[in-house]
Amino acid sequence: MSTTEPIASVTALRRPAVHASTLVRSDVEHTFEVFVRTIAAWWPVRRLSAGGARVQNVTLEPQVGGSVYETWDDGMTVEWGQVSAWDPPHGFVMSWNSTPAPTEVELVFTALGPTLTRITVEHRGWDRLTDEQLAADCAEPGGYGAGGYDTGWTLVLTSFARAVHTNASDVEITDDYMQQMLTTTKEYTFVLLSQGPHYGAPGTDTIIWEHGRRNFQLRAQGQLSVVCPVRDDTSRCGVGIFNADVEETEEIMRGDPGVQAGVFVYEIHPVRSFPGDGLPARA
Protein backbone atom coordinates (compact mmCIF):
# COMPACT_ATOMS: atom_id res chain seq x y z
CA MET A 1 0.00 0.00 0.00
CA SER A 2 1.32 3.43 -0.88
CA THR A 3 1.84 5.72 2.09
CA THR A 4 0.00 8.43 0.16
CA GLU A 5 -3.24 6.43 -0.03
CA PRO A 6 -6.02 7.66 2.27
CA ILE A 7 -6.80 5.48 5.25
CA ALA A 8 -10.46 4.60 5.59
CA SER A 9 -12.02 5.31 8.94
CA VAL A 10 -15.36 4.70 10.58
CA THR A 11 -16.94 7.54 12.45
CA ALA A 12 -19.32 6.55 15.24
CA LEU A 13 -22.64 8.35 15.34
CA ARG A 14 -22.43 11.15 17.87
CA ARG A 15 -26.15 10.83 18.51
CA PRO A 16 -27.22 7.24 17.81
CA ALA A 17 -30.72 6.28 16.79
CA VAL A 18 -33.33 5.31 19.36
CA HIS A 19 -34.41 1.68 19.02
CA ALA A 20 -37.32 -0.28 20.45
CA SER A 21 -38.94 -3.60 19.56
CA THR A 22 -41.67 -5.99 20.59
CA LEU A 23 -42.97 -9.40 19.59
CA VAL A 24 -46.64 -10.24 19.00
CA ARG A 25 -48.42 -13.51 18.34
CA SER A 26 -50.07 -12.47 15.09
CA ASP A 27 -49.26 -12.92 11.41
CA VAL A 28 -47.40 -10.05 9.78
CA GLU A 29 -50.28 -8.92 7.57
CA HIS A 30 -52.71 -8.67 10.46
CA THR A 31 -50.11 -6.99 12.65
CA PHE A 32 -49.39 -4.32 10.06
CA GLU A 33 -53.11 -3.70 9.51
CA VAL A 34 -53.81 -3.28 13.23
CA PHE A 35 -50.93 -0.80 13.52
CA VAL A 36 -51.95 1.32 10.55
CA ARG A 37 -55.75 1.10 10.53
CA THR A 38 -56.51 1.28 14.25
CA ILE A 39 -53.74 3.58 15.47
CA ALA A 40 -56.31 5.92 17.04
CA ALA A 41 -57.62 3.09 19.23
CA TRP A 42 -54.33 1.96 20.75
CA TRP A 43 -51.87 4.89 20.59
CA PRO A 44 -51.41 6.32 24.15
CA VAL A 45 -52.57 9.80 23.10
CA ARG A 46 -53.15 11.18 26.59
CA ARG A 47 -49.44 10.81 27.28
CA LEU A 48 -47.84 10.91 23.83
CA SER A 49 -49.53 13.54 21.68
CA ALA A 50 -49.79 17.29 21.28
CA GLY A 51 -53.42 17.50 22.36
CA GLY A 52 -53.56 14.94 25.15
CA ALA A 53 -57.13 14.42 26.34
CA ARG A 54 -58.42 16.61 23.48
CA VAL A 55 -57.32 14.15 20.80
CA GLN A 56 -60.31 12.50 19.16
CA ASN A 57 -58.60 10.68 16.32
CA VAL A 58 -55.22 9.78 14.82
CA THR A 59 -54.92 9.28 11.08
CA LEU A 60 -52.17 7.59 9.10
CA GLU A 61 -52.67 8.05 5.35
CA PRO A 62 -51.37 4.77 3.84
CA GLN A 63 -49.25 6.01 0.93
CA VAL A 64 -46.01 7.80 0.14
CA GLY A 65 -46.62 11.48 0.83
CA GLY A 66 -49.49 10.69 3.18
CA SER A 67 -49.80 12.61 6.41
CA VAL A 68 -49.87 11.28 9.95
CA TYR A 69 -51.83 13.62 12.19
CA GLU A 70 -54.03 13.92 15.28
CA THR A 71 -57.46 15.59 15.30
CA TRP A 72 -58.71 17.48 18.34
CA ASP A 73 -62.25 17.81 19.71
CA ASP A 74 -62.67 21.18 17.94
CA GLY A 75 -61.53 19.84 14.56
CA MET A 76 -58.00 21.24 14.80
CA THR A 77 -55.30 18.95 13.38
CA VAL A 78 -51.64 18.63 14.35
CA GLU A 79 -49.36 16.83 11.91
CA TRP A 80 -46.91 14.29 13.29
CA GLY A 81 -45.13 13.78 9.97
CA GLN A 82 -45.34 12.49 6.42
CA VAL A 83 -44.85 9.00 4.99
CA SER A 84 -41.69 8.83 2.85
CA ALA A 85 -41.57 5.06 2.21
CA TRP A 86 -44.46 2.60 2.16
CA ASP A 87 -43.98 -1.20 1.89
CA PRO A 88 -46.92 -3.08 3.43
CA PRO A 89 -46.83 -5.37 5.33
CA HIS A 90 -43.08 -5.01 5.86
CA GLY A 91 -42.95 -1.45 7.11
CA PHE A 92 -42.88 2.26 6.42
CA VAL A 93 -40.77 5.36 7.04
CA MET A 94 -42.09 8.74 8.09
CA SER A 95 -40.74 12.11 9.09
CA TRP A 96 -41.24 12.98 12.75
CA ASN A 97 -42.14 16.64 13.15
CA SER A 98 -42.85 16.51 16.89
CA THR A 99 -39.16 17.01 17.62
CA PRO A 100 -37.73 20.57 17.67
CA ALA A 101 -36.20 19.84 14.24
CA PRO A 102 -37.67 17.10 11.98
CA THR A 103 -36.29 13.60 12.59
CA GLU A 104 -37.17 10.27 10.98
CA VAL A 105 -38.93 7.12 12.19
CA GLU A 106 -38.80 3.71 10.53
CA LEU A 107 -41.17 0.87 11.48
CA VAL A 108 -40.22 -2.66 10.37
CA PHE A 109 -42.54 -5.68 10.62
CA THR A 110 -40.73 -9.03 10.40
CA ALA A 111 -42.53 -12.36 10.15
CA LEU A 112 -40.82 -14.88 12.45
CA GLY A 113 -43.45 -17.54 11.87
CA PRO A 114 -47.02 -17.99 10.60
CA THR A 115 -48.39 -16.32 13.75
CA LEU A 116 -45.40 -14.46 15.14
CA THR A 117 -44.20 -10.95 14.17
CA ARG A 118 -41.46 -8.68 15.46
CA ILE A 119 -42.03 -4.91 15.25
CA THR A 120 -38.98 -2.67 15.48
CA VAL A 121 -38.70 1.11 15.64
CA GLU A 122 -35.67 3.15 14.65
CA HIS A 123 -35.94 6.87 15.43
CA ARG A 124 -32.97 8.64 13.83
CA GLY A 125 -31.72 12.01 12.67
CA TRP A 126 -30.75 13.40 16.08
CA ASP A 127 -27.70 15.21 14.70
CA ARG A 128 -30.12 17.81 13.37
CA LEU A 129 -30.88 18.97 16.92
CA THR A 130 -28.80 21.24 19.12
CA ASP A 131 -27.58 20.12 22.53
CA GLU A 132 -30.26 22.29 24.14
CA GLN A 133 -32.99 20.73 22.00
CA LEU A 134 -31.79 17.22 22.83
CA ALA A 135 -31.99 17.97 26.55
CA ALA A 136 -35.45 19.59 26.38
CA ASP A 137 -38.45 17.67 27.68
CA CYS A 138 -40.58 15.80 25.16
CA ALA A 139 -43.69 13.86 26.15
CA GLU A 140 -41.35 12.15 28.60
CA PRO A 141 -39.06 14.19 30.89
CA GLY A 142 -35.50 14.81 29.80
CA GLY A 143 -35.94 14.33 26.08
CA TYR A 144 -33.38 12.44 24.02
CA GLY A 145 -30.51 13.09 26.39
CA ALA A 146 -32.22 11.39 29.35
CA GLY A 147 -33.83 8.53 27.42
CA GLY A 148 -37.25 10.13 27.09
CA TYR A 149 -37.72 8.85 23.55
CA ASP A 150 -36.60 5.34 24.53
CA THR A 151 -39.30 5.36 27.20
CA GLY A 152 -41.86 6.80 24.80
CA TRP A 153 -41.35 4.25 22.04
CA THR A 154 -41.34 1.39 24.53
CA LEU A 155 -44.69 2.64 25.81
CA VAL A 156 -46.04 2.87 22.25
CA LEU A 157 -45.02 -0.69 21.37
CA THR A 158 -46.32 -2.05 24.69
CA SER A 159 -49.68 -0.43 24.03
CA PHE A 160 -49.71 -1.76 20.47
CA ALA A 161 -48.83 -5.30 21.53
CA ARG A 162 -51.65 -5.24 24.05
CA ALA A 163 -54.07 -4.16 21.30
CA VAL A 164 -52.94 -6.92 18.95
CA HIS A 165 -53.22 -9.59 21.62
CA THR A 166 -56.63 -8.33 22.72
CA ASN A 167 -57.76 -8.37 19.11
CA ALA A 168 -56.51 -11.95 18.83
CA SER A 169 -57.73 -13.14 22.25
CA ASP A 170 -60.42 -15.32 20.69
CA VAL A 171 -57.93 -17.26 18.54
CA GLU A 172 -58.46 -21.01 18.89
CA ILE A 173 -55.40 -22.75 20.33
CA THR A 174 -55.25 -25.69 17.95
CA ASP A 175 -52.60 -28.41 17.79
CA ASP A 176 -51.26 -26.78 14.60
CA TYR A 177 -51.00 -23.41 16.36
CA MET A 178 -49.11 -24.98 19.25
CA GLN A 179 -46.72 -26.74 16.86
CA GLN A 180 -46.07 -23.47 15.00
CA MET A 181 -45.36 -21.61 18.22
CA LEU A 182 -43.04 -24.31 19.54
CA THR A 183 -40.82 -23.89 16.48
CA THR A 184 -40.22 -20.25 17.51
CA THR A 185 -38.80 -21.02 20.94
CA LYS A 186 -35.15 -20.44 21.83
CA GLU A 187 -32.81 -21.95 24.42
CA TYR A 188 -32.08 -19.96 27.58
CA THR A 189 -30.64 -20.78 30.99
CA PHE A 190 -32.56 -20.57 34.27
CA VAL A 191 -30.73 -19.76 37.52
CA LEU A 192 -32.14 -20.24 41.01
CA LEU A 193 -30.23 -18.28 43.65
CA SER A 194 -30.35 -19.37 47.30
CA GLN A 195 -28.73 -18.36 50.58
CA GLY A 196 -25.15 -19.53 50.95
CA PRO A 197 -23.17 -20.45 54.07
CA HIS A 198 -22.12 -16.82 54.70
CA TYR A 199 -25.52 -15.25 54.12
CA GLY A 200 -26.17 -12.74 56.92
CA ALA A 201 -22.50 -12.42 57.89
CA PRO A 202 -21.06 -8.93 58.51
CA GLY A 203 -20.78 -7.04 55.23
CA THR A 204 -23.50 -9.05 53.49
CA ASP A 205 -25.54 -5.96 52.60
CA THR A 206 -22.59 -4.40 50.78
CA ILE A 207 -21.92 -7.60 48.85
CA ILE A 208 -25.59 -7.94 47.85
CA TRP A 209 -25.55 -4.31 46.63
CA GLU A 210 -22.59 -5.08 44.37
CA HIS A 211 -24.33 -8.26 43.22
CA GLY A 212 -27.26 -6.07 42.21
CA ARG A 213 -24.96 -3.65 40.40
CA ARG A 214 -23.56 -6.53 38.38
CA ASN A 215 -27.09 -7.67 37.51
CA PHE A 216 -27.85 -4.21 36.16
CA GLN A 217 -24.74 -4.46 34.00
CA LEU A 218 -25.73 -7.90 32.72
CA ARG A 219 -29.20 -6.57 31.86
CA ALA A 220 -27.69 -3.64 29.97
CA GLN A 221 -25.48 -6.06 28.02
CA GLY A 222 -28.46 -8.24 27.07
CA GLN A 223 -27.19 -11.30 28.95
CA LEU A 224 -29.69 -11.31 31.84
CA SER A 225 -33.12 -11.19 30.22
CA VAL A 226 -35.24 -11.53 33.37
CA VAL A 227 -34.21 -11.07 36.99
CA CYS A 228 -36.59 -11.43 39.94
CA PRO A 229 -35.48 -11.13 43.57
CA VAL A 230 -37.58 -13.32 45.88
CA ARG A 231 -39.44 -11.18 48.43
CA ASP A 232 -40.86 -13.64 50.94
CA ASP A 233 -39.24 -15.25 54.01
CA THR A 234 -37.46 -18.17 52.40
CA SER A 235 -33.94 -19.38 51.69
CA ARG A 236 -34.54 -18.71 48.00
CA CYS A 237 -33.09 -15.33 47.02
CA GLY A 238 -33.89 -14.85 43.36
CA VAL A 239 -34.44 -16.27 39.89
CA GLY A 240 -32.95 -15.22 36.58
CA ILE A 241 -33.22 -16.19 32.93
CA PHE A 242 -30.01 -15.72 30.96
CA ASN A 243 -29.70 -15.21 27.23
CA ALA A 244 -26.73 -17.58 27.25
CA ASP A 245 -26.03 -21.30 27.23
CA VAL A 246 -25.32 -23.32 30.38
CA GLU A 247 -21.53 -23.07 30.09
CA GLU A 248 -21.60 -19.28 29.58
CA THR A 249 -24.04 -18.85 32.45
CA GLU A 250 -21.87 -21.00 34.72
CA GLU A 251 -18.93 -18.70 33.99
CA ILE A 252 -21.04 -15.61 34.66
CA MET A 253 -22.26 -16.97 37.99
CA ARG A 254 -18.77 -17.96 39.14
CA GLY A 255 -17.81 -14.29 38.76
CA ASP A 256 -20.72 -13.03 40.86
CA PRO A 257 -19.45 -11.23 44.01
CA GLY A 258 -22.16 -12.78 46.16
CA VAL A 259 -21.28 -16.28 44.98
CA GLN A 260 -17.57 -15.66 45.46
CA ALA A 261 -18.21 -14.49 49.04
CA GLY A 262 -20.40 -17.48 49.88
CA VAL A 263 -23.44 -15.25 50.40
CA PHE A 264 -25.25 -17.07 47.57
CA VAL A 265 -25.27 -20.53 46.05
CA TYR A 266 -27.01 -21.33 42.78
CA GLU A 267 -28.33 -24.05 40.55
CA ILE A 268 -28.57 -23.88 36.75
CA HIS A 269 -31.06 -25.48 34.34
CA PRO A 270 -31.39 -25.25 30.55
CA VAL A 271 -34.86 -24.03 29.50
CA ARG A 272 -36.71 -22.94 26.36
CA SER A 273 -39.04 -19.97 25.92
CA PHE A 274 -40.43 -17.48 23.41
CA PRO A 275 -38.10 -14.65 22.25
CA GLY A 276 -39.71 -11.27 22.87
CA ASP A 277 -41.88 -12.36 25.79
CA GLY A 278 -41.63 -9.93 28.68
CA LEU A 279 -43.14 -8.91 31.97
CA PRO A 280 -46.19 -6.64 31.53
CA ALA A 281 -45.70 -3.02 32.50
CA ARG A 282 -47.81 -1.64 35.34
CA ALA A 283 -50.42 0.89 34.25
Image (tube, grey):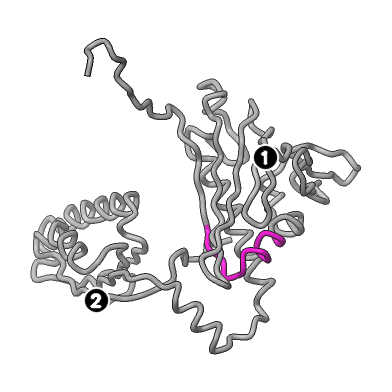
Q: Residue at x 56, y 56 (%)?
A: 119
Q: Nearer the viewer, residue 81 or 200?
A: 81
Q: Quadrant of the N terminus?
A: top left
Q: Amino acid at mark 1?
A: Met
Assess whether residue 25 is covered by the magenta stretch: yes
Q: Residue furthest front?
A: 1
Please name whichever residue, 231 or 276, is drawn nearer the observer in this view of the structure.
Answer: 276
Quarter of the figure that contains the C terminus? bottom right
Q: Residue furthest bottom?
A: 175
Looking at the image, which residue sits at the far right? 74
- Say whether residue 133 is left or right of residue 55: left
Q: Residue at x 13, y 70 (%)?
A: 196
Q: What x and y, as percent, mark residue 225?
A: 36, 61
Q: Residue at x 67, y 64 (%)?
A: 29
Farthest top residue? 4
State which tag comes first along the sequence, 2 or 1.
1
Which mark, by number, is residue 94? 1
Horizontal placement of 257 versus 107: left or right? left
Apparent side of residue 210 relative to residue 22 in the rendered image (left or right): left
Residue at which label 2 appears: 269
The percent coordinates of residue 60 (x first, y second) are 77, 48
Point 75% across, 41% down: residue: 64
Classed neighbour count for the residue bearing mark 2: other residues with Cα under 10 Å, few (<14), some (14–19), many (≥20): few
Above or below residue 244? Residue 151 is above
Q: Which residues are magenta?
A: 22-34
